[in-house]
Image: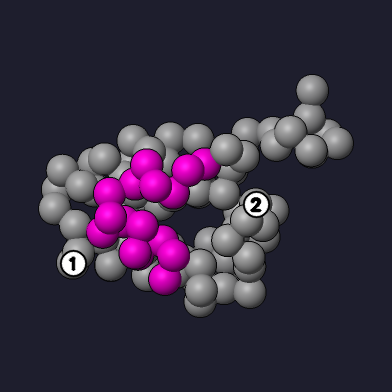
Amino acid sequence: MKAALVFASLSGLAAAGFNIFLLPACARHCVLSAVRKTKCSVVDNQCLCGGEAQEIMRPFVTDCMDVKCTADEKHGAMIAFSVACTERHPHDPSGP
C-alpha cells in the first residue's frame, strides 16, 4: 500500500507547474532516472502521465526511494507529488 500511495502521488510529477526542485535530492535522482527509462521528455506531461510510462517508472521510483531516501524524505516527496495527472492541464481542450 505504501508503494501505491507513493506512486499515486508520483503521477503528479508531470502535472502543469510541477517543480522537481521541490523534491528532496534523493527523490529527484530517482524520478529523473526513471524518466530516462521512458520514451518521454521530462516536460511531456501527457506522455509521463500515460500508462506505459507509469508502468516503467512505478517500480523503479518506489525501489529507488526505498534505498536512497529516509522516511522523512519519502514523506516530503509524497507531499510534493500532491498534484495528480488526472487534473486538467491548462492546454487540455477538454478542461473547463
Compared across the picture, whether 70 is left or right of 96 comes to left
Q: Position of residue 5 (x, y in %)?
A: 35, 45
**Tag 2 residue:** 45
- The answer to which quarter of the image holds residue 95 is top right
Would you say residue 81 sits in the magenta stretch?
no
Mark number, residue 67:
1
Would you say residue 23 sits in the magenta stretch?
yes
Q: Residues within 10 Å of mark 2 (few under 14, many from 20)?
A: some
Question: Which element type, helix, strand or loop, lies under badge 2?
Answer: helix
Who's the residue at 19% across and 57% down the image?
69
Q: Position of residue 41 (x, y in %)?
A: 63, 65
Who's the residue at 13% across and 53% down the image?
70
Question: Which element type, helix, strand or loop, lies under badge 1?
Answer: helix
- The amino acid type, in three-letter code, at marker 1 is Val
Compared across the picture, whether 38 is left or right of 64 comes to right
Between 5 and 68, the residue placed more toward the observer is 68
For marks 1 and 2, the one nearer the N-term is 2
